[in-house]
Amino acid sequence: MKKSLFVLYACVAIGMSSCSDSPDLYKDPDRPVDERVDNLMSQMTLEEKVAQMCQYVGLKHMRNSEKHLSLEELEKNHAQGFYKDLHSSQVAEMVEQGWVGSFLHVTDLEEANYLQSLARKSRLQIPLLIGIDAIHGNGLCYGATIYPTAIGQASTFDTLLVKKAAEETAFETRATGSHWAFTPNVDIARDPRWGRTGETYGEDPFLVSAMGVATVRGLQGNKTDKSEHVLACVKHLVGGGQSVNGRNCAPFDASERMLDEIFFPPFKACVEAGASTLMAAHNELNGIPCHGNKFLLTEVLRDRWHFDGFVVSDWMDIERLYGQHRTAETPEEAPWCLSMRG
C-alpha cells in the first residue's frame, strides 16, 4: 500500500512539472477531452482525487433533517442523509475546499447554482456533478412532469414513446441544475412481493432490454448537445428483483446460465447503447456483495462488456460492506475492500 501511494505521488509530481506552463489548459473547451483530463489530473493531489468520488445529499435536504429530527432519530434513519459529526455548514465549507465531487437530490436551480458557486471558490474550480432520482419524470422537483411508472411504460410496448418521455425528463432535469439521472432500473422483476417492482419494466428480459435502451438514448441524446441531456445510470447490477421473500437488499443466488440468459441481457444492452454510468445492487450475489464483487464489476462489466463509464454505489452500500455483509473489518476499510474486489 505504501509503495502504491509513493508511485501515485511521484506521478502527480511529474505531471505537475509538465503542465506548469499551461495550468489552465483543462478549462479550455476547444481542447481535446483527453488532453484536458490529463492536464487536470496532473495538478490534483491524492486528497482531491478521492474527493471527486465523494457524494453528499443537498444542503437543503440536510438542513431539513437537522431541523426536524433529533440526533438519535438521525442516527437510526438512513433515508435522511445524515453524516455523523458533520453539519451542513461544514459540507458547504468542504465544497469550497474542493473536497466534494458530487451531490444528489438537489431539488431546485437556486440551490444547484449556489453549490456550483461554492465549487468555483476551490483551488481547481472543478464543477460539481449533481444527480437525482428522475425515474419517471423529475418527480422530486416541484412543477416537473410526471410520467407513468416504468412498469406502466413497459405495458405500452412503445419504445419510441418511452424514449420521448426520457428526452423530456432529461430537459426538465437539466433545467433544475442536475446532470445525471439515476435511471433506468433494468432489474428483472421475478417476485411480485418485491416493493420496487413498479420501478422496473417487468419480468421479460427482451422487453426490459428494449425499454432500458430507449430510456438511455432518450436521456443521453447523442452526447453532443449537453445542455438538454443528462447521464443515464443503469441499475442495479444485479438480481434485486428476485430477492428472498421479496425483501429489498436480500441475498440472491443464481447460476451463471441464469445470469447470462435472464438477468444480464438488459445491462449488456444498455452498455452497448452507450450508457455512461451504472449502479451496483444492494444485495449479495452467491454470497458476495455486489458492491465488492470482482466477477460482476471487473470480469463481466469491464472485461466482457468493455464498459468504459463509471460505477456508482447505491445508498449507504459502502458502509454496508462493514455493517451488513461483514466483508470489511472496519468502516474505514470498506472503500478499500471495494476497490480490491471491484
Image: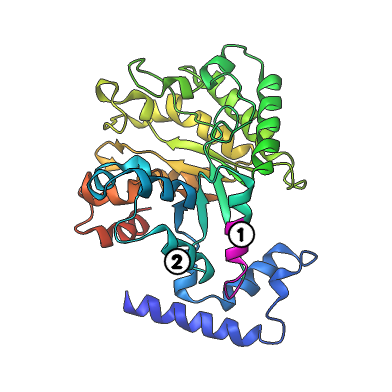
Q: Name the residue: 26% across, 50% down.
A: 71
Taking the image as shown, residue 287 lies to the left or right of residue 185, namely: left
Estimate the x, y position of residue 316 in percent, counting from the top left: 34, 46
Q: Is residue 161 shown in magenta?
A: no
Q: Which dot, 2 or 1, sits closer to the camera?
A: 1
Q: Circles 2 and 1: CB distance less than 8 Å?
A: no
Question: Which residue in the rendered view is the most extreme toward the right?
Answer: 30
> From this viewpoint, which residue is outermost toward the front?
67
Q: Which residue occupies the foreground of this view, 91 or 275? A: 91
Q: Which residue occupies the foreground of this view, 168 or 18? A: 168
Residue 116: assigned label: 1
Q: Is residue 321 above or below residue 170?
A: below
Q: Which residues are magenta?
A: 114-124
Q: Position of residue 143 (x, y in %)?
A: 63, 31
Q: Residue at x 29, y 21 (%)?
A: 246
Colouring: rainbow
Please say whether residue 122 is one of the residues in the magenta stretch.
Answer: yes
> Looking at numbered disc 1 in the image, what kind of residue is underneath it?
Gln
Asked if residue 319 lies left or right of residue 299, the reply is left
Does label 2 or label 1 sit earlier along the sequence? Answer: 2
Q: Residue at x 56, y 26 (%)?
A: 209
Front residue of 281/263: it is 281
Residue topped by disc 2: 50
